[in-house]
Amino acid sequence: MTSHPPAGTPSGIVLEHVTKRFGRTEVLTDISAVLPPGRIYGLLGANGVGKTTLMSLVCNHTFRSGGTVLIDGEDPAENPVVLGRTCFIREDQPYNDAFKVRDVLSAVSWFYPDWDAALAERLADRFHLPHRTTCKKLSRGQRSALAIVISLASRAAYTFLDEPYLGLDPSARGIFYDELLLAYSEHPRTIVMSTHLIDEAAGLLEEVLVLHEGRIVLRADADEARTSAFVARGLDSAVTALVGHREVLSERRLGSILSVTVRGARTADDESRARAANIALEAASLQELVAAIGIGGIGGVDTESFTTQRTSR
Amino acid sequence: MTAFAEGRPIFLDLADRMADDILAGIYPEETQVPSTNELAAHYRINPATAGKALNRLVDQNVIYKKRGLGMFVATGAPEALRASRRASFTAEFVLPLLDEAARVGLTTDEIVTMIKDQS
């Protein structure tokens, strides 16, 4: 079907018709995507849509039920060379409870050929990780910080971060964003990150893939995705006329006022018609778009919806 | 991190912001503007997005690349920016003003008086 570049060349991740079943439950259905190397991807979607499973099977932590996965042209399954180029940090990364932080950092350094010990030390200090404390005594936030330290110091060509910052306070998340960008600028790599804090992290991403019910329902340039939905709010009949046949992701009513989230970019024509009909047009953020998809908006018109609280202009 | 306008690609907003800074004289003609990585780190955005903002300014001849050195403000860029901002002034500022005026029942004469009182 496709011709793949020779093994070893950084060619990114190729997924072809990837399927994963747990018993009779199909968690991933016919996932096909090409992720060119050297970009930061956001893997987004509601809980339970298959984000963790997809990352797990790309990193060979889980076996796939069907389809093809290639990293740099090679199947990562039972392939230590390719897996040495991957780092997968789980949402609840398990550690040996008896190990001290510095023992963990020293132990994981063996897995990663490009391990940056100086960076690991600097990051551990920045996150105030106590080197002599055993993992058992780390707080939720400290465990996340440790996972982040490992992921960035691994310098793995393919780094997967599954909800990397549970329990991290806003200033620690800020440190994470800064260090992620710094590490990425100094040593470009492919980063796939799942997160629910989309508004906060959206700017870091180059591309977004949105999963819903085990399928990729949206793939877009992250910056352009900011214009891939909008909210129109006004009198029911006027809003309905403005929206026309376009896809409505969600709608809310308040008496005769209708507020709809519409998929697609708003046009200059929309702007002038909205002005004439007293309709307020507002941007829907990427987070709102993903939330609307999670509620089941894509592929059909839903009735219940999510809240967008905004002050009117 | 400074928030970018919703519903608009960040790269457009960032390009406008840098154009504002050039107009304000923060980056004078023939001086260097921040690099892709500096912008990415400062605004906590993807370097590709920062790069697109710089490329947009290059396409508009506002900045240019000096090989091996970085991006510099073109001679005449502030004047060119002023001209293009003047050209879009009606659409960007006057029409929204008239919209709001109509909504609250202000006449054009009343608006003119308000503007004169301010200046």
Image: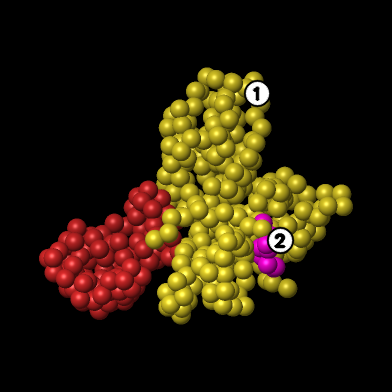
- The one nearer the camera, A9 or B99, is B99
- The one nearer the camera, A54 or B43, is B43
Relative placement, left or right, of A44 versus A19 is left
Q: How far is the residue under mark 2 from the one under mark 1?
A: 36 Å
Q: Specify the quadrant of the image occupied by residue A15.
A: bottom right
Residue A215 - label: 2
Q: Position of residue A250 (x, y in %)?
A: 62, 62
Q: Check contact, mark 2 vs mark 1: CB within 8 A.
A: no
Mark nearest the camera among 2 and 1 is: 2
**The colour assigned to chain A within the rendered structure:** yellow
Q: Position of residue A246 (x, y in %)?
A: 60, 75
Q: Position of residue B103 (x, y in %)?
A: 36, 70
Regarding mark 2 in the picture, which secondary structure is present there? strand
Residue B49 visible from this viewpoint:
no
Subunit bearing disc 1:
A
For mark 1, what is the residue? A97
Relative placement, left or right, of A190 versus A217 is left
In the rendered structure, which segment of residues is drawn in magenta? A295-303
Query: What residue is rendered at 60% in x and 55% in y?
Result: A306
